[in-house]
Image (cartoon, rainbow, N blue to C red):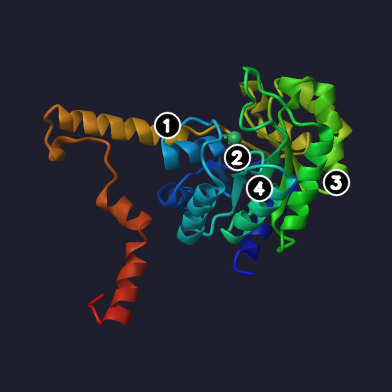
Amino acid sequence: MAFRSRREQLRSILSGATCVHPGSVYDAISIRIAEDLGFPLGMFGGSVASLAVLGDPDVTLITLTELAEQMRRMSRASALPVLVDADHGYGNALNVRRTVQELEAAGAAGLTIEDTLLPAAFGEAKTQLISLEEGVGKMKAALCGRTDASLVIMGRTGAASITSLEDAIRRAKAYEAAGVDALFFTGITSRVELEAVSAATRLPIVLGGAPEDLNALDYLAGQRVRIALQGHAPIAAATQAVYETLKALREGASPKSLRGLASSELTARIMREADVRARSADLLGLKK
Ligand SMILES: O=C([O-])CC(=O)C(=O)O
Ligand SMILES: [Mg+2]
């Protein structure tokens, strides 16, 4: 299986004793940069997928096909293991199974299925959760959807900030019993809350959207947190850079006067130009 070693790398992060920050990746360029900088893992968030592919906010307008296609492009560009935010699995439990099949084929190392009611319900301003029973069904569907047993399936809940911490723990324990490989929590806002979920569960923990005082990697590792997300600054940085560059050009700046552009060396490295040249020499009879 071509993607097995990526999945085993993610599994070794989960079974290790330390906590890592993944690089937020969303396309072929960002994943190659994260790989070159030595990140052990890429995180492909649903919000950045929506932004990069559609230019939209994170309101479940992106389709599974679009998400999987973007993942496939990243898998082709780089061997960095990627954890994909598969949202609610793009429908009911049967859709979850299909989602897992598509993301596995696209080369994801792991994926998260969450128990948020998506897309948002009519007339409800506040985020809702599906029932625990439906959530368990989705986790089971995810597990039976994989054909490569090394693909990592994570159960995700944001219950801590939507219903209650007790509900988050109840759900996490049920997903654990269903057989998922790790638990992904959002909405945990303090050490007390993290310690409560850690004490009540046994699987490796992934923490999304945590506040600053939940940032010390040694402390997190001691609570069985193996992956701690840091948001999605790279796409924000890229957006700002494109904005500034287009603005300057629109205002009459000459291309040569622009600052902050990737050097030709950096661009060549990201394009893996040396490999392409070597291949061209071999296959097209061109000079190296
Ligand atoms: O997975 C993450 O990085 C957090 C999240 O839900 C998103 O960005 O859509
Ligand atoms: Mg998301």
List the residue tagged with mark 4: 111
Q: Earlier in the sequence, mark 3 or mark 2?
A: 2
Kind of residue at badge 3: Ala
> Around disc 1, counting alpha carbons within 10 Å, would you say few (fewer than 14), some (14 to 19), or many (20 or more)?
few
Q: Could one spot residue 190 in this view of the protein?
A: no
Q: Ligand 2 is found in which quarter of the picture?
A: top right
Measure the C-alpha gap from mark 4 to mark 1: 23 Å
> Around disc 3, counting alpha carbons within 10 Å, would you say few (fewer than 14), some (14 to 19), or many (20 or more)?
some
Which disc, if any, is residue 21?
2
Which disc, if any, is residue 140?
none
Measure the C-alpha gap from mark 2 to mark 1: 18 Å
Measure the C-alpha gap from mark 3 to mark 2: 27 Å
Kind of residue at badge 4: Leu
List the residue tagged with mark 1: 236
Measure the C-alpha gap from mark 2 to mark 4: 16 Å
- Report helix, strand or loop for mark 3: helix
Image point (64%, 51%), residue name: 99
